[in-house]
Amino acid sequence: MGAEGAERDAVGALFEELVREHRVTGAQLAVYRDGALSEYATGLASVRTGEPVTPRTGFPFGSVTKFLTAELVMQFVCDGDLDLDDPLAGLLPDLGRAADPALGTATVRQLLSHTAGVVDSIEYDEMRGPSYRRFASACARQPALFPPGLAFSYSNTGYCLLGAVIEAASGMDWWTAMDSCLLRPLGIEPAFLHDPRPGQGGAARPVAEGHALRAGGERAERVDHMASLSLAAAGGLVGSATDLVTAARPHLADRKTFAQHDLLPEDAVLAMRTCVPDAEPFGLADGWGLGLMRHGTGEGAWYGHDGAVGGASCNLRIHPDRSLALALTANSTAGPKLWEALVARLPEAGLDVGHYALPVPDSAPLAPDTGHLGTYANGDLALMVTHDAAGDLFLTRESYSDYRLSLHEDDLFVARSGEPGALPITGRFVREHPAGPVALLQYGGRAMHRL
């Protein structure tokens, strides 16, 4: 057996081992390197039906959808139908009449890079059809989180607004544009969690159901993906790990060996991975471009995106210079732990994948401080820092489990859930000035104002 075959076998054996170890219901791994694609699939698409996972099975992409929405936007930019620095007020008339004029001055570039000052999510009566016009109107009634271009704050709403921008530029709804302009030309079979177009409601390909570990992590139960129709442009695509690697091919140094490389010119893919200066995506990555996050720096930098919906997760990594792309899909709440373990051990199989490591406080926990208590909000997302009778702190969200919160130096905090397979959350509090009161809470790339 040659070295290439041995490495493939090593990756496959490691993948199978870790899927079993973390009790993931079903998963796919796709690796493109040295001009060759390797596909791995294991487990069940559903514990309810017993259907096995194959390389064709569709998994929810979650927020990795944003990578493909960004590619679609860049197509229209390259065709001259959009300009990255177009203000939204000129594209979406409702934002020209926004309650907060700052929203209308935000640009397409700022939406793509999460620097537009748009809140993460809004309360919204669900869409009734394939149009983001009413969603844009609802956004126009919201205050800006901060002036556009000032800082980074991850925003699902911002990418849903890009759905409206795509409609304005193309005359097509986001679903049709994604289907006809990007996915089919790439050779990807289109599928969506929700397809509101008449006659397009069901995906032809099998789609994995979501699962959560229960009863001490010994048993998987089916759970709903909990993704609304209005979040489609930010998190509504379905596909395989191989589909994601295919979508990454135009970003690689050997792009000209890919028949569809001209769908995205080289300057477009370079713009997507050029990180926005002075915008720190704390809790998510080392840097952020136009639809791609960066892990590491210099020649060691990797690019990609991560995503999750109820009972499923997805990860994509791209190393352009090495012409290497890798994607993992999983239909389990244990998927994020599988990814962490896979990244840690892939060097054993000859693959050293870049991954952002959350800052882990090296100091012992500090005594609880009531100066952190309060409600922190970003749009309709609100988190409460509370304490119990013993004075211990908790981070909680309505209808969700409490996370036990420990404080550390430099205003870092770690929040831990009691749910099986859940990873701890590292975040930080931000003060108005070094000795001043806490003004913001940051976690998962989101900035939340203290109310």
Image: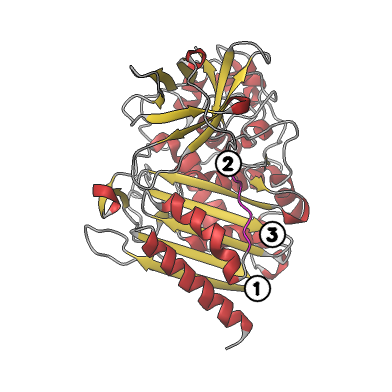
> Looking at the image, which is closer to me, 132 or 440?
440
Q: Earlier in the sequence, mark 1 or mark 2?
A: 1
Instruction: Give the mark toward the camera: 3 or 1.
Output: 1
Q: Of helix, strand and loop, which one carries label 3? A: helix
Amino acid identity at mark 2: Leu
Amino acid identity at mark 1: Gly
Amino acid identity at mark 3: Asp
In the image, residue 293 above or below residue 123:
below
Badge 2 is on which residue?
Answer: 358
Residue 161: % across, % down: 54, 31
Instruction: Give the magenta range.
Output: 352-357
Badge 1 is on which residue?
Answer: 35
Q: Residue 83, located in which quarter of the rendered image?
A: top right
Residue 335: % across, % down: 42, 52
> Looking at the image, which is closer to me, 393 or 230?
393
Is residue 184 among what the camera can see? Answer: no
Q: Earlier in the sequence, mark 2 or mark 3?
A: 3
In the image, residue 236 above or below residue 300:
above
Q: Residue 53, located in which quarter of the rendered image?
A: bottom left
Structural distance between the alpha carbons of marks 3 and 1: 18 Å
Residue 67: % across, % down: 57, 47
Q: At 22% from the left edge and 61% from the top edge, which residue is drawn?
A: 49
Residue 326: % across, % down: 57, 61
Quadrant (top left/top right/bottom left/bottom right) for the N terminus: bottom right
In the image, residue 315 above or below residue 140:
below
